[in-house]
Amino acid sequence: MFTRLFCIWRKWKTQRSTFSYAVVIFSYLFKQAVRNEKDLHSVNVPPKYRSMNSFWKYYSGQEVAPFPTIFIGGNHEASNYLWELSVLLFGCLSRYYGGWAAPNIYFLGFGGVIKFGNIRIGGLSGIYNARHYQLGHYERPPYNESDIRSIYHVREYDVLKLMQVEEPIDIFLSHDWPLGITDFGNWKELVRRKPFFEKEIQERTLGSKAAAELLDKLKPPYWFSAHLHCKFAALVQHGEGGAVTKFLALDKCLPGRKFLQIVEIESEPGPYEIHYDEEWMAITRKFNCIFPLTRKCMQLGGVQLDSQDCLQWVRSRLKARGSRPFDFIRTVPSYDPFQSIMEGSLSGNCRNPQTESLLQFLELPYLLDNTLEPSGLHQNPVSFISRDNSEGVVDEDIEDAAIDDMDEVEELEELMMWIRSIIDSAVCIWGRGVSQLYPVQ
């Protein structure tokens, strides 16, 4: 996928005489984010879809992304590495806060905002599932079959942090679509191409409630999504005479599919580099004290924490250090197609150095390998409620069978179409046989 996309970008660049600079943004399935064989065990896809692909070449330094590349997590990434980055990418919580997944390839975290030049880019990783929305980030590697799915489910805590953003966002990314976005585009054409969406559109269950709340709050000029494996555009008018959001979802990266869109956005002169965002750093520092890390249901809707007192502190710190993210550091051996790596050598350090450096810079404790709530959680006068254990823990034995994997949905739809075609053919053959036995007089 990477090689194909970057080749397309290079070709486009040579054809555009006015081209100045580009940033590549991914909001669709980043299921190639595996560094070695062990990461494949943390990828939420059936075994038949698991393969090394090409990300390991960029992680190892064998290949380098020709353009700055920014992405969010979907529901198929290597969770152990992203949690490690999550405080980098999405599997190892250590990736929770975001950072470099490989040289020139940046992960926005489970929720985050960065600057590219003077353009502010925000994002929310994962997909919405109401059953896990109010839980903490309780999953830890090694993941069981339940955890490997639930770790990709959006949590209210990350949405709450993004809801605190007051300065304008230029581009926002979410993996699944905001709930109700189909009202603002050609939904009839969408249903013609994806007929199994019609019931969810009518019942207003297609999309993410959390993303819809963020769209209404942030009102960015551009919003990009993926997940549903089809291209769909919409134009959202926020009130009469209000701001307008151009929404675009793209298909998955396969031949003949609409997976790439080039958008030109005016910006001030460079340098065109990825930098930390001051406001987001202040929000991160302020809200770290209520970081939920258990399976208890938390009601965070009433939480009010003023991060303005942190903003000046962050500005002075960034002015002294600089706002470029901490350097990329490989934490485990990369895949070698010519040599099998011993299991012990793949253990790595789940505490990603980028995350550790960021937290030290913000003077925050490292909480991601803990199973307890941060000690400051109960010391702040915030109005959230932690339900008791009998109500607050999700019973995995009664987990519903909802499918949140579009690969599975598409496979099921193709199977149903195949069955219908077989039935239609059988009816047609049977009909001809009857007409021969009982010809019309």
Image (cartoon, rainbow, N blue to C red):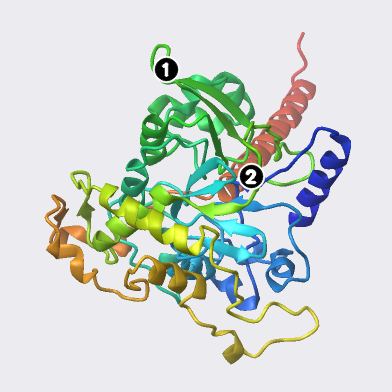
All told, the count of numbered labels is 2
Q: 8 and 410: which one is in front? A: 8
Q: Mark 2: give few (<14), some (14-19) or many (20+) Cα within 10 Å.
A: few
Q: Which residue is mark 2?
A: 415
Against 140, residue 149 (above or below) is above
Q: 310 and 111: which one is in front? A: 310
Against 30, residue 15 (above or below) is above
Q: Kindly indicate the quadrant of the structure image that contains residue 215.
A: top left
Q: Which residue is mark 1?
A: 242
Q: Kindly indicate the quadrant of the structure image that contains residue 284.
A: bottom left
Q: Which quadrant: the N terminus?
A: bottom right
Q: Kindly indicate the quadrant of the structure image that contains residue 370.
A: bottom left
Q: Earlier in the sequence, mark 1 or mark 2?
A: 1
Q: What's the residue type where badge 2 is placed?
A: Leu
Q: Is residue 1 visible?
A: no
**Residue 398, position in %: x, y?**
30, 59
Q: Is residue 55 left or right of residue 213?
A: right
**Residue 84, position in %: x, y?**
48, 71
**Residue 395, position in %: x, y?**
27, 62
Q: Secondary structure at mark 1?
A: loop
In the rendered image, the residue lying farthest to the top is 441
Q: Residue at x 78, y 66 (%)?
A: 63
Q: 432 and 189: which one is in front? A: 189
Q: What's the residue type where badge 1 is placed?
A: Gly
Q: Residue at x 43, y 12 (%)?
A: 241
Against 411, residue 33 (above or below) is below
